[in-house]
Image (spheres, rainbow, N blue to C red):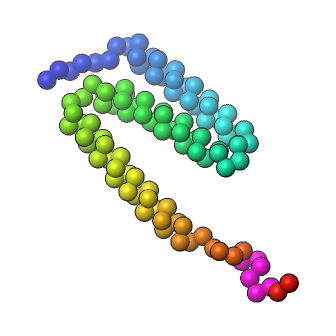
Amino acid sequence: MDNAQPPLRSYVVVYLLLMVGLAATVGVAYVPLGRWNLPVALAIAFAKATLVVLVFMHVRYSPRLTWIAVFAGLVWLAIMLALMMADYATRIPTTTPALMGREE
C-alpha cells in the first residue's frame, strides 16, 4: 500500500484558500444579495469542505474504496436533506396567520 503524503506546500496553499473562503463567507454575509445569499454561502461552504476532505483527510491520496465510502456518505446526506426539505415544505403556511379570519 502506497502511503503518499502531500507536500507541505499543498497544506499551506489549502490553508490560505480556506482563509480566503472565510473572508468570502464573512463578505457575503454583509452584501445584500437577496435570495442568493444562502446559495452563495452554501457554495463557499461546499468548496471549503471539499478542500478539507481532499487534503487534510487525505482522501485525494486514498484507495478507491475510501472514495466509494465518501461518495456513499454524500448520497446519504443528500437523501436526508431531501427528506428534511420535503418535511419543511409541508409545514409552510399557505396564508398569513395575522390575516386569518379577517374579512376585508
Left or right of 12? Residue 27 is: right
- Name the quadrant of the C terminus: bottom right
At 35% from the left and 46% from the top, the residue drawn is 74
- Name the quadrant of the N terminus: top left
At 30% from the left and 31% from the top, the residue drawn is 59
Left or right of 43? Residue 57 is: left
Left or right of 75? Residue 83 is: right
12 falls in the magenta region? no
- Comparing 51 with 94, the one in front is 94
Report x, y in % for residue 10. 40, 17
Asked if residue 36 is positioned above or below residue 104 in the image, the reply reads above
Asked if residue 77 is positioned above or below residue 24 in the image, the reply reads below
- Dividing the picture into quadrants, the one containing residue 69 is top left
Magenta stretch?
Answer: 97-102
- Dividing the picture into quadrants, the one containing residue 26 is top right
Asked if residue 77 is positioned above or below residue 19 in the image, the reply reads below
- Dividing the picture into quadrants, the one containing residue 8 is top left
Report x, y in % for residue 48. 48, 33
Report x, y in % for residue 30. 72, 39
- Looking at the rendered structure, the number of numbered marks drawn on it comes to 0
Asked if residue 59 is positioned above or below residue 89 in the image, the reply reads above
At 25% from the left and 40% from the top, the residue drawn is 68
At 63% from the left and 73% from the top, the residue drawn is 93
